[in-house]
Image: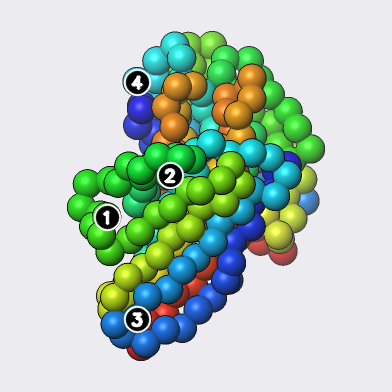
Amino acid sequence: GAVVSQHPSWVICKSGTSVKIECRSLDFQATTMFWYRQFPKQSLMLMATSNEGSKATYEQGVEKDKFLINHASLTLSTLTVTSAHPEDSSFYICSARQDGASGNTIYFGEGSWLTVV
Amino acid sequence: DAKTTQPTSMDCAEGRAANLPCNHSTISGNEYVYWYRQIHSQGPQYIIHGLKNNETNEMASLIITEDRKSSTLILPHATLRDTAVYYCIVRSFGNEKLTFGTGTRLTIIP
């Protein structure tokens, strides 16, 4: 299957600082990528849809100025958590849609653990 | 997208077939059924998807009822590494999003 890679796999940052997470589609182009957040023992919650060359679309309740998304190329989207606080500590997962004839399958990265101290 | 209903948890003996049901009674004609699984502390892994015909790949088989209101994911010979949360998701071809429910926690027992 298609490969989506996230970096870093885990990061610890101090409260008030910003941290960037990268999401790359390694063997396919992705016009559209998605960012999810998952708290322990909960399901994945969609944060935003990232479209190459245009502004991201955020889900209701997600602060666009806090979670900055940039999708500058067909293989890379980045999520920057600005002014991070301990409550932002979570598992962040990206996914990328592989365009194709059969259902436009979406593939997920390995996830990035963020701990804000 | 149509909502899905899955059992909260299931157990299956190692080496046996694991059959995971999913109800999607409000599915519409252009909506696909997708299955993903999430092993602890990892991103979801794509398993299989289908529209109305049964599908099989190297990981699993997907059986969709004729009225498309339910489906079953079959792992033919479950191993311990198949222990995970399995998500059944219905998504229309033109809809970008995958919306996750609570899934089924499958535990493979030695």
Q: Which residue is mark 1?
A: A64
Q: Which residue is mark 4?
A: B26
When the figure is inspected, residue B39 is found, relative to residue B52, above or below; the finding is: below
Q: Are marks 2 and 4 in contact (CB under 8 Å)?
A: no
User: Of marks 2 and 1, which one's residue comes earlier in the chain?
Assistant: 2
Q: Secondary structure at mark 2?
A: strand
Do the residues at discs 4 and 1 belong to one chain?
no
Amino acid, disc 2: Ser
- The one of B60 and A85 positioned closer to us in this rendering: A85
Residue neighbourhood size for the residue with mark 2, other residues' Cα within 10 Å, grouped as few (<14), some (14–19), many (≥20): many
Chain of the residue displaying label 1: A
Q: CA distance from mark 3 to mark 2?
A: 23 Å
Q: Which residue is mark 2?
A: A50
Q: CA distance from mark 1 to mark 3?
A: 17 Å
- The one of A25 and A44 positioned closer to us in this rendering: A25
Q: Position of residue B93 (x, y in %)?
A: 49, 21
User: Of marks 3 and 2, which one's residue comes earlier in the chain?
Assistant: 3
When the figure is inspected, residue A117 is found, relative to residue A101, above or below; the finding is: below
